[in-house]
Amino acid sequence: MNDTTSIKFNNDGLLMAVGNAVGKVNVYDLRYPKPLYTINHSYKLPIKTIKFHEISKNIITVDKKLAKLSNMQTGKAFSNIETKFEINDMDIYPNSGMLFFACEDETIQNYFIPGIGAAPQWCHFLENITEELEETKNYSVYEDYKFVTATDLEQISATNLIGTKFLKSYMHGYFIDWKLYKKVY
Amino acid sequence: MKPFETAAENINSCSVNYNLDILGIAGEKGIVELWDIKDKKKIVGLPLLDNTFFKSYE
């Protein structure tokens, strides 16, 4: 089970990544005899392909279930991608954050990760979508409320509000409308 | 074109190092070999990928 299944050099030729049949990828610096670090895939499946994403300094290691992005120098995990279908191969659009996955399906799965690179010119609209997603703020239900405990209520002399519609019981305390809290505080 | 005579029974993957003119091959039983592309000479062969065995290689 120690079969090596994938090998890849980075662009400057000093790093060599070798993946094996049990989901381990050893990354070597050719000037040093021991591996710099080892990337472990939790599913322990054979490594299908390895790519170096030079602009973000990440290494992308792929087994049939997931692609793992790790820092090229340290091996620290950056992100994981799990596709709907089993992966056969993966490639990167040059100088971008776009990845293509060839899977056990008729369609090519494409993923855009803004954290590792920009969108290619031919699909620059992805940048706009990303910006819109960043700007969209998710308001939580209790955004305009403050959490107070019974002790807090005693301190602001608002224990008479317990049981009324102005306090919503939650865990070991209550939610009180922020404006009301400021008024009684 | 003369083929590279590797020690691996089956080669699963290969990669070219353009900067250093090296060909890396990965095969069965953990064999990893680096070959000089121009001279077709084996530079080094790593016996086993597993870290625990790597000490004996040194």
Image (spheres, coloured by chain):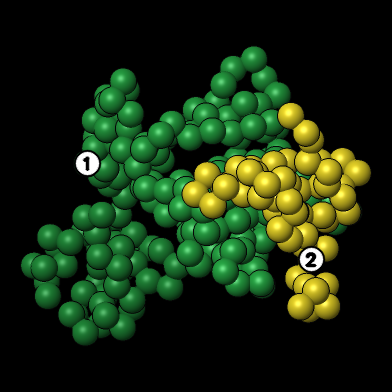
- What element does badge 2 sit on? loop
Task: Point out the residue furthest to the right here.
Answer: B9
Residue that numbered label 2 is attached to: B50
Please rate how many residues cluster around mark 1, counting C-alpha atoms within 10 Å: few if below 14, some from 14 to 19, many from 20: few
| Image x and y of residue A143, in percent | 26, 54
Q: Tell me where residue A154 sits by quadrant.
A: bottom left
Chain identity for the colour yellow used in the image: B
Question: Is any atom of residue A43 visible in this view?
Answer: no
Chain identity for the colour green used in the image: A
| Image x and y of residue A98, in percent | 42, 33
Judge by depth and name the residue closer to the eye, B18 or A24.
B18
Judge by depth and name the residue closer to the eye, A35 or A157.
A35
Residue A30 appears left or right of A46: left
Residue at 65% in and 44% down: B37
Q: Is residue A104 above or below residue A176?
A: above
> Are the residues at dot 1 and dot 2 in contact (C-beta closer than 8 Å)?
no
The residue type indicated by label 1 comes to Glu
Q: Tell me where residue A25 sits by quadrant.
A: bottom right
The N terminus of chain B - image quarter: top right
Q: Which mark is residue A135?
A: 1
Question: Is any atom of residue B50 visible in this view?
Answer: yes
The residue type indicated by label 2 comes to Asp
